[in-house]
Amino acid sequence: MQEELFTSGRNIPNIDPSLEVWHWPIALYLFLGGLAAGILFFAALFYVLGKDKEYPAAVKKASIIPPIALSLGLLALVYDLTHPLYTWQLFTTFRIESPMSWGAWVLMIVTPLSFLWTFGYYRETYANIESKLKLFTRLKFLHDVEMFVIKNRKKIAYALIPLSLILGVYTGILLSAFNARPLWNNAILGPLFLTSGLSTGAAAIILLSKSAKEKHLFGKIDLGLIIVELALIAHMIMGYYAGSQVQLEAVELLVGGEFTLMFFGFVVLLGLLVPATMELIELVGYKVPVIVPAVLVIIGGLVFRFVMIEAGQLTRYLY
Amino acid sequence: MRYAMVIDTLKCVGCSDCVVACQTENNIPHGYCRDWITEAVSGSYPNVELELRSERCNHCDTAPCVRCCPTGASHIAEGGVVLVTADECIGCGACIESCPYDARYQHPDGHVDKCTFCYHRLEKGQLPACVSVCPTRCMYFGDLDNPNSQVSQLLKNRKYKTLAPEAGTNPHVFYLI
């Protein structure tokens, strides 16, 4: 039934006329979480494969990003809570039905592991910084921590592979679990956000890498991930069109509505199609500054999170 | 015991007395409300129909807000009443995002707030404030598990609907139509 609704006596902040409960920190966190998940996954995977000498940026150098990204992301998350002094309540329970509870616990495990991982390579990769800071001569216990990490590196890597994948998928499932927001309620969002996170992770590794071989390999990986991501986006859009009235109205925001330019212009064209074309040209053998597609992929990933957070909260049930 | 509210849309005049009663009884901060009036106009002129509804949390059986709450602050209390424990709530907003009825809001104190069916009054054997003040007596409250209660009888004899049943929430505020 199509109705015209007037709600009287209600103008609640952040609720009316449309939800504005989740703001930019959530979008930023979803991006940073995906980026960290991507880098950690590649670092752990290439270490387990015994390729840490061959691909040093992936395993060692880029691993400085996840602890910083996760810390910033956690700060952003807490900043968006309205009752932040009670954050510890998250860790008094584990609620299997709540994606946010899963996320809180996974972050609780992955964040320290990401610190340990990058710390294990700190003296080796950032020797020039250490020679200035002299942390190891000032704090003796750091030697023991480093020894512990080096001894258990394989175990940490094997833990990080599934955990980083769960972290990446969770950023999408967090949204897709909300039946009440038709734009989010699409099961493809989990794999889509994971793919996007892996892709931004690969792009960050390209940016930090100095070896042509490594840049080439991660360009190839990124190209593959972009193709998968485009296919998943096509599936997502198809899913809305095959859905109910609320989903048909939700997809209008992305196709023809107010987010069309942001979604198709910045995410699909500049964030996926252009970098994919450039990486393809590079693969064929032409010289392309790989920094350009890598930066485009990262910006596209960030814009994608903002579009989904903002547009999703405009969609709702009709009754 | 399963509390339910039945609202007769044919009797409601949309006076908002229920809204004010709730704000007074529950000391709701200025600018917020736990219940509100919706005027739904359907059809096209000259064949239009107007329906007036007093809306609030539907105290769903399969409550999405309770499912997605990461701390367990949102819970289902005795009688099927959905409640929020303020000092377990971190204010993450997941329950607000999950509610198809937009029945929850962030209280200025930080925690999430919503209709409680006036749980503190139920414990004393009183009716919710909104029901007790309704000047047209269009609102009924009672136990759905008791087949002889007024609400059970009304749902047995009258045509009724719930809001957005397609959301799969199994709401427990019923509207007589």
Image (cartoon, coloured by chain):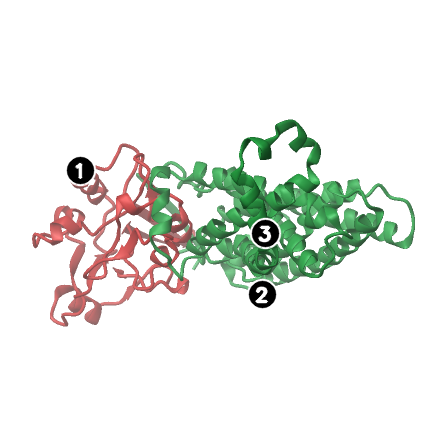
The number of numbered discs placed on residues in the rendered structure image is 3
- Image chain in green: A
Residue B26 drawn at (x, y percent): 19, 41
Secondary structure under tag 2 reads loop
Amino acid carrying mark 2 in the image: Ala
Residue with the mark numbered 1 = B24
Residue at position x 70%, y 41% in the image: A125
Kindly indicate the quadrant of the structure image that contains residue A85.
Answer: top left
Q: Colour of chain B?
A: red
Residue with the mark numbered 2 = A242
Residue B162 drawn at (x, y percent): 31, 62
- A243 to B136, vertically: above or below: below
Q: Is residue B131 left or right of residue B166?
A: left
Residue at position x 70%, y 57% in the image: A46
Assess disc 1: are there few (<14), some (14-19) or many (≥20) residues with their C-alpha within 10 Å of its C-alpha. few
Residue with the mark numbered 3 = A252
Asked whether the beta carbons under mark 2 and mark 3 sit within 8 Å of each other, the answer is no
In which quadrant will I find the N terminus of chain A?
Answer: bottom left
Amino acid carrying mark 3 in the image: Glu
Which mark sits nearer the N-terminus, 2 or 3? 2
Q: Is residue A153 left or right of residue B65?
A: right
In which quadrant will I find the C terminus of chain A?
Answer: bottom left
